[in-house]
Image: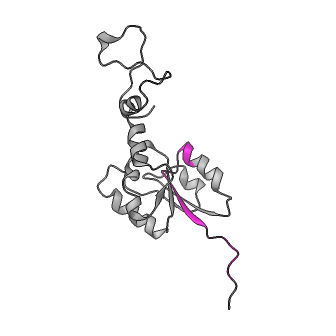
Amino acid sequence: MTEPSTQPRRVNVLVFPCGSEIGTEIHQALRYSLHVRLFGASSVDDHGAFRYDRYRGDLPNIADARFDEAFAALLSEWSIDLVFATHDSVQEHLSGTLAALGVALVNGDRETSAVLRRKSRTYRQFSGAAWMPAVYDDLDAVDQWPVVIKPDRGQG
């Protein structure tokens, strides 16, 4: 009879894309964990190649028709259990696809991702809250200038 292992099973965690500041912070937070085996991937070679011991920099962009197949193959090859999406568009895309692959997305509630990706949906979700900014449908309705104009979808 063999003794059971006292070593906990390590969770395989993928950070994608991993070369951003967010990817660097996740790396710094988890790199010494005894419970995590950390992986990084990106669609372009970037700083993640210097941070992550287990790294892939040649994935298609999420807008590419080949992305889902290539990403699923990588998840399978590395036996990934958990994914951190470090970009809004990646989070939104993966929130609709990873569950079917048996992989968890840390920030992956599909409805929350959709609401947070679009300012109009976020504003509707929280309409009536005192801290919400005024929203105007046309310039003639603006009663005090200056105003900030932002795209509905995007960052920055």
Vertical comparison of 60 with 4: above or below: above
Tell me which residue sits at (50%, 64%) in the image.
80
Tell me which residue sits at (39%, 25%) in the image.
150
View extreme (bottom): residue? 1
Q: Is residue 90 visible?
A: no
Task: Please state the horizontal and vertical placement of residue 108, each as a whole percent of the image.
Answer: 45, 50
Residue 14 versus residue 41: which sits nearer the camera? 14
Vertical comparison of 25 with 103: above or below: above
Task: Please state the horizontal and vertical placement of residue 56, each as a whole percent of the image.
Answer: 48, 60
Q: Is residue 19 magenta?
A: yes
Vertical comparison of 25 with 34: above or below: above
Quadrant for residue 143, please give it.
Answer: top left
Residue 7 relative to residue 150: left or right: right
Quadrant including the C terminus: top left
Tell me which residue sits at (68%, 88%) in the image.
2
Tell me which residue sits at (44%, 68%) in the image.
76
Q: Is residue 24 magenta?
A: no
- All told, the count of numbered labels is 0
Q: Which residues are magenta?
A: 4-23
Q: Is residue 27 visible?
A: yes
Task: Please state the horizontal and vertical placement of residue 82, each as a whole percent of the image.
Answer: 51, 59
The scheme the figure's colours follow is one colour
Quadrant including the N terminus: bottom right
Residue 27 relative to residue 100: left or right: right
Task: Please state the horizontal and vertical placement of residue 87, each as a whole percent of the image.
Answer: 46, 44
Residue 93 versus residue 50: which sits nearer the camera? 93
